[in-house]
Image (spheres, helix red, strand yellow):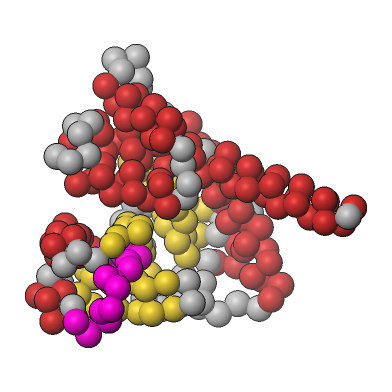
């Protein structure tokens, strides 16, 4: 009984810890999307997808509504998306995507993470050709269908690959085809669970177990920052 209680307690604390970090980050993206294209998700595809992504992380409706409302609140500081590039422990290359209302604060924080591990921030654009940006959709096909039923139509929309894994089914396309692919999936009645743009290293580098531990400790610190949305590396 005691062990089971402690396990449930630990699992609950882990969930709360995850939510306390993820929900504010998701809220920022919702606010940015609503600010850019308006607060009506039916008329704003970017906002519609941001809400779907938030729901996939079990973000409560009240939190989502509050994030949308902040976009129209005159007292809310403007939120912007910025990208920083750097070299972390053992020379690992990193691209850090942020959403912030204070770029001075954000760049200072991100720079400190790199400096403390003996790394450095790089000039924007230095790593541009080290990563390929792709549109990634986690999807569910309609009951009784398979990817073969949709592959030709999706190729016309810019499909690169459909991958079926233990974590689900993923559709990949060039990042410039995000809107076209999103529309094609919706038109085909394919359920979009999550959708975003991700970066993939063109030449992944392998590291020793000891180096990986050091790199992961560094990444944990960066990802814990409230302004950081995503971190991509060239680690294999």
Horizontal side of 71 relative to 90 (left or right) equals left
Residue closest to the far bottom? 148
Task: Please determine whether, in this image, residue 219 is positioned above or below residue 188.
Answer: above
Residue 138 inside the magenta-drawn segment? yes
Residue drawn at 79 percent across, 55 percent down: 7
Picture layout, residue 26 above or below residue 92: above
Image location (x, y in percent) of residue 152? 13, 81
Q: Residue at x 83, y 51 (%)?
A: 6
Q: Residue at x 34, y 14 (%)?
A: 75
Which picture quadrant has residue 178?
Answer: bottom left
Quarter of the image that includes the N terminus:
bottom right
User: 197 or 4, which lies in front?
Assistant: 4
Q: Up-down: is 183 above or below 5?
A: below
Residue under the point 82% across and 51% down: 5
Residue placed most toward the observer, 106 or 166: 166
Is 204 inside the magenta-drawn segment?
A: no
Residue 21, x across and y down, in percent: 55, 42
Question: Between residues 211 and 144, which one lies in front from this camera angle?
Answer: 144
| Position above or below: 50 against 40 | below
Which x, y percent locates residue 14? 67, 49
- Which residue extends farthest front? 144
User: Which residue of the protein is positioned furthest toward the right in this rendering?
Assistant: 2
- The residues colored magenta run 133-149
The reply to whether residue 71 is visible in this rendering is yes
Residue 99: % across, % down? 39, 39
Evaluate whether residue 171 shows in this view. no
Looking at the image, the residue that sits furthest to the top is 75
């Amino acid at each position: 009984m005691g062990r089971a209680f402690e396990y449930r307690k630990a699992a609950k604390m882990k969930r709360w810890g995850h939510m306390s970090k993820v929900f504010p980050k998701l809220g920022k993206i919702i606010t940015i999307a609503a600010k850019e294209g308006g607060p009506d998700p039916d008329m704003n595809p970017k906002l519609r997808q941001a809400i779907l992504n938030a729901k996939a992380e079990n973000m409560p409706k009240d939190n989502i509504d509050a994030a949308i409302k902040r976009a129209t609140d005159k007292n809310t500081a403007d939120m912007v998306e910025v990208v920083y590039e750097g070299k972390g422990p053992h020379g690992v290359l990193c691209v850090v995507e942020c959403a912030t209302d204070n770029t001075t604060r954000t760049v200072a924080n991100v720079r400190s993470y790199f400096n403390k591990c003996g790394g450095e921030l790089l000039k924007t654009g230095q790593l541009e050709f080290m990563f390929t940006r792709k549109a990634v959709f986690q999807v569910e096909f309609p009951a009784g269908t398979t990817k073969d039923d949709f592959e030709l139509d999706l190729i016309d929309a810019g499909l690169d690959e459909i991958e079926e894994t233990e974590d689900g089914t993923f559709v990949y396309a060039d990042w410039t085809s995000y809107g076209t692919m999103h529309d094609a999936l919706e038109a085909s009645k394919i359920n979009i669970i999550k959708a975003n743009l991700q970066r993939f290293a063109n030449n992944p580098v392998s590291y020793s177990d000891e180096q990986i531990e050091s790199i992961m400790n560094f990444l944990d610190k960066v990802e814990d920052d409230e302004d950081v949305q995503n971190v991509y590396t060239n680690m294999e």
